[in-house]
Amino acid sequence: NAGVTQTPKFQVLKTGQSMTLQCAQDMNHEYMSWYRQDPGMGLRLIHYSVGAGITDQGEVPNGYNVSRSTTEDFPLRLLSAAPSQTSVYFCASSPLAVNYGYTFGSGTRLTVV
Amino acid sequence: AQTVTQSQPEMSVQEAETVTLSCTYDTSESDYYLFWYKQPPSRQMILVIRQEAYKQQNATENRFSVNFQKAAKSFSLKISDSQLGDAAMYFCAYRSLNSGYALNFGKGTSLLVTP
């Protein structure tokens, strides 16, 4: 099925550990982004990309790293996990045009202990 | 970044009744798009409806419609004939070229549907 594939769905990390959340889309979308969702805070933009080789920071980028080596993949790296990074993470993609909404992945629930 | 405000953290509606969720936004742009997303307990984000700012006609998708007041910067969602499956978090979002193609989300409204 065409869409955004996000893995893993659940993850528990210890403080200080690193990990990568994977995101892949097969719709040839230029735009990809990562959000975190916290209770009462809505969805906040972490990083985004408008094409392969191009990334930029969103509202809450600290502690996260991204790269975009291909159109399809946009992994999110947690460099040294902290309890404040406990959240639900969403990857989303869209064509590079503002009249489109996003297609979202199914989300990753991350707990840092 | 443009600010999107959802002033109702929680709303409740009885089955078969109509409910309206509020959303306001702050922008100086004239060309932008507005969206409502639904997030059921499954966590999946589902696009409900979309409105182009240059269109005066309000968007409608089956039981879902919007009341778009551009001058007032208001974009409310009306759900008619509410069903138990409508229970979810609802997010209002704004997108424009000047926002770097990013969707700016409100904090959400939790909708409870009672039998």
Image (spheres, grey):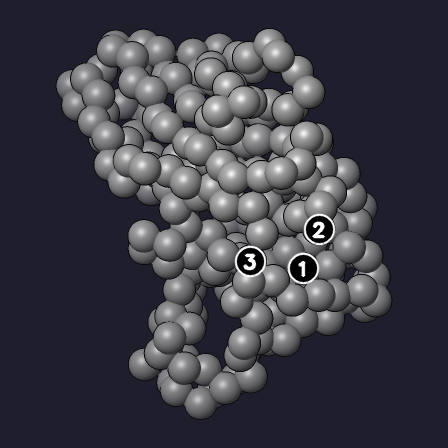
For the point 61% across and 62% down, the residue is A58
Answer left or right for A56 relative to A34. right
Task: Tell me the chain of label 1.
Answer: A
| Residue with the mark numbered 3 | A45
Residue A48 or B22: which is nearer the viewer? Answer: B22
Residue A58 or A24: which is nearer the viewer? Answer: A58
> At which x and y percent is residue B7?
32, 37
Answer left or right for B20 relative to A43. left
Q: Secondary structure at mark 3?
A: strand
Q: Are marks 1 and 3 in contact (CB under 8 Å)?
A: yes
> At which x and y percent is residue A101?
63, 36
Quadrant in the picture for the N terminus of chain A: top right
Res A20 visible: no
For the point 71% across and 46% down, the residue is B98
| Residue with the mark numbered 2 | B100
Task: Tell me the chain of label 3.
Answer: A
Q: Hey, which quadrant is residue B20 in on the image? A: top left
| Residue type at numbered disc 1 | Tyr
| Residue with the mark numbered 1 | A48
In the rendered image, residues at marks 1 and 2 fall on the same chain: no
Q: Hey, which quadrant is residue B32 in on the image? A: top right
Give the CA distance from mark 1 to mark 2: 9 Å
In the rendered image, residues at marks 2 and 3 fall on the same chain: no
Quadrant in the picture for the C terminus of chain A: bottom left
